[in-house]
Image: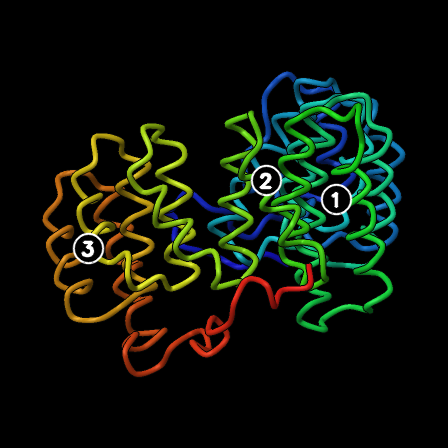
């Protein structure tokens, strides 16, 4: 059941509309249901889930797309929305954009029953866009396996599927990029080599994905590489390099990151703000406080969140996220 939430955020409130009535409205009514009425699709019971499965294809494609889009967007602000069962119906939709949005909406769902459908989509969906979204979604299962939150065998299934995509000679580049970013959560031997190969790829898209992967790998040996890309001519590269520096706590990049707060590209400035929040320390905190005076609302919001990170992660000089001794070895000792 949905509970009332702050209306100023335009999120859902409790609805009295039944699933049956909502489905009929979606099928025959020309007027679009409100987000409150769509809330009937939250936390579906098994009988209601079966009704949705049976009638979903009878709803016009445009209405199906709008329904999934509205609910997924609302779920970002309303944690009471439980869309798992509903979106499991939508990932089987005949429409590419509906499938893609539904998989996006399941991004933080690590129910093991999703692994097989996502692998099936990754391997056989006719749309490269949808396959790429599936590759991105499988990363959550790789990470959950590393954190021992799901069965290791199930996590390995996701990882092996992603590795097969990376080794394919025919798969689309965007799918391989998302596969690399997802498999980077794995601690298995050989992942570092895949990231390095991507970094030296002739395709900028893959180079950018290698930086995303560096940040996700928690491998502090990538710190210097990520820092070196902060001055890259490509704003997309600078953006992901900044984020990677933050995720890897590359404190040597502190001054470079502060200089990016005046970068001409907004995405770079936002990434630098994020990174400074992860690095912490007095200089980073002062720089973030100065960003609170920005005229850009997104920058102010990002700075507020980064300052919360400073408190959460603690002072970087006192509570390091990584064991610095891990980096005190020669590359020759790495058996990857």
Circle 1 SS class = helix
Circle 3 sits on which residue? 255
**So how many labels did they put on this image?**
3
Circle 2 sits on which residue? 71
Instruction: Please report the residue visible at 35 percent of the width from the left and 61 percent of the height from the top.
Output: 250
Residue 300 position in % (x across, y down)? 21, 48
Inter-mark Cα distance, 2 to 3: 41 Å
Residue 287 position in % (x across, y down)? 14, 57
Circle 2 SS class = helix
Query: Is there a contact, CB below 8 Å, between mark 3 and mark 1?
Result: no
> Who comes first in sequence, dot 2 or dot 3?
2
Instruction: Please report the residue visible at 33 percent of the width from the left and 66 percent of the height from the top.
Output: 309
Inter-mark Cα distance, 3 to 1: 47 Å
The quadrant the N terminus occupies is: bottom right
7 displayed left or right of 79:
left
**In the foreground, 131 or 304:** 131
Find residue 313 and report its image quarter. Answer: bottom left
251 displayed left or right of 121:
left
Instruction: Please report the residue visible at 76 percent of the width from the left and 26 percent of the height from the top.
Output: 171
Find residue 168 and report its image quarter. Answer: top right
Circle 1 sits on which residue? 86
């Amino acid at each position: 059941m949905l509970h009332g939430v702050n209306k100023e955020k335009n999120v859902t409130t409790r609805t009295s509309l039944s699933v049956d009535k909502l489905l009929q409205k979606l099928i025959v009514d020309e007027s679009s249901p409100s987000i409150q009425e769509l809330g009937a699709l939250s936390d579906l019971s098994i009988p209601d889930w079966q009704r949705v499965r049976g009638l979903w294809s009878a709803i016009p494609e445009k209405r199906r797309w709008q329904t999934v889009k509205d609910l997924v967007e609302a779920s970002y602000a309303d944690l009471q929305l439980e869309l798992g069962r509903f979106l499991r119906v939508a990932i089987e939709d005949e429409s590419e954009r509906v499938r893609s949005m539904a998989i996006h909406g399941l991004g933080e769902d690590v129910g093991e029953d999703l692994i097989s459908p996502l692998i099936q989509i990754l391997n056989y969906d006719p749309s490269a866009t949808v396959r790429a979204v599936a590759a991105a979604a499988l990363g959550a299962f790789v990470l959950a396996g590393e954190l021992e939150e799901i069965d290791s065998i199930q996590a390995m299934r996701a990882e092996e599927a992603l590795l097969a995509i990376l080794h394919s000679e025919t798969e689309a580049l965007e799918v391989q990029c998302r596969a690399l970013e997802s498999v980077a959560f794995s601690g298995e031997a050989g992942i570092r080599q895949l990231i390095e190969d991507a970094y030296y790829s002739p395709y900028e898209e893959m180079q950018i994905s290698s930086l995303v992967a560096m940040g996700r790998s928690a491998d502090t040996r990538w710190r210097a590489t990520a820092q070196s890309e902060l001055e890259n001519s490509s704003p997309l590269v600078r953006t992901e390099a900044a984020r990677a520096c933050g995720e890897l706590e590359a404190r040597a990049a502190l001054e470079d990151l502060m200089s990016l707060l005046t970068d001409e590209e907004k995405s770079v400035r936002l990434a630098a703000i994020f990174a400074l929040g992860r690095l912490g320390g007095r200089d980073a905190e002062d720089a973030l406080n100065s960003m609170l005076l920005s005229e850009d609302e997104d920058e102010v919001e990002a700075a507020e969140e980064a300052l919360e990170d400073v408190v959460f992660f603690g002072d970087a000089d006192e509570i390091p996220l990584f064991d610095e001794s891990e980096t005190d070895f020669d590359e020759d000792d790495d058996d990857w």
